[in-house]
Image (tube, grey):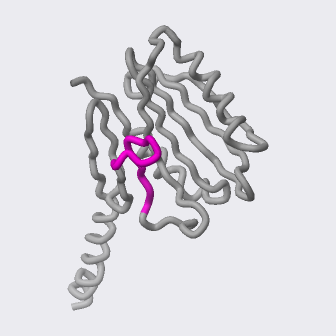
Amino acid sequence: MKNLLLIFILFPIIIIAQEQNENVKYEKDNYSIEYPSNWILNDSGDNGTKIFLYPTNTESSDIFTENINLIVQNLSDTTIPLEKYKELVEKQIGGMLTEPKIASSEIKNKNGLKSHQLIAEGKSGNYKFKTIIYTYLTEKQIYTLTFVTLYDNYKNNHVESLRIMDSFKLTKK
């Protein structure tokens, strides 16, 4: 009888835990990304973003909502190499944040594509932020995938956010 009672108690908990870990795959144009079902995806194009992802259970909803966003830009000059964009992104961090610190800035192979990956921190107003930026360059477009969170919340939420960002793939159509 105790075993049966234990099953009735544990079974709903296991089901709920599995539901929270379900991923949703979003595919559009020539890219895809996977994110947990407890995150919200907005693809309305607001603020120039293709997608804007944020968790439903954010710790900092009154101040700032951690988010991942994707911006896609058409290239006017297709001869600029990724190394040059790396320099531009590093300079932009200095223009967006006060007291910026770049923890890393590397060109890597990601999902079969060469990409620039930057981790930085700095202040904006009275708040300190941490950001991770992945930049992908194709023949005609540049894809910038960015995660932004309050600095104090980074340790709690960067693993899940990196998993989402690492799922980003460019597909051929």
> Whole-percent x and y of residue 126?
74, 58
Q: Is residue 61 left or right of residue 53?
A: right
Asked whether 157 or 173 is in front, the reply is 173
> Whole-percent x and y of residue 149?
58, 53
Q: Is residue 5 left or right of residue 168?
A: left
Question: Toward which corner of the image does residue 171 lie, by quadrant?
Answer: top left
> In the rendered view, would you say 58 is above or below 88?
below
- The number of callouts visible is 0
Give me the residue at 24% from left, 80% from top. 7
Give me the residue at 46% from left, 46% from top. 47
Give me the residue at 27% from left, 46% from top. 25
Residue at the extreme right: 99
Q: Is residue 51 left or right of residue 92?
A: left
Residue at the extreme bottom: 1
> In the rendered view, would you say 68 is above or below 145?
below
> Whole-percent x and y of residue 148?
56, 49
Extent of the magenta region: 43-55
Is 109 magenta? The answer is no
Residue at the extreme top: 79
> In the rendered view, would you say 155 is above or below 116?
below
Give me the residue at 21% from left, 85% from top. 4
On-image quarter of the C terminus: top left
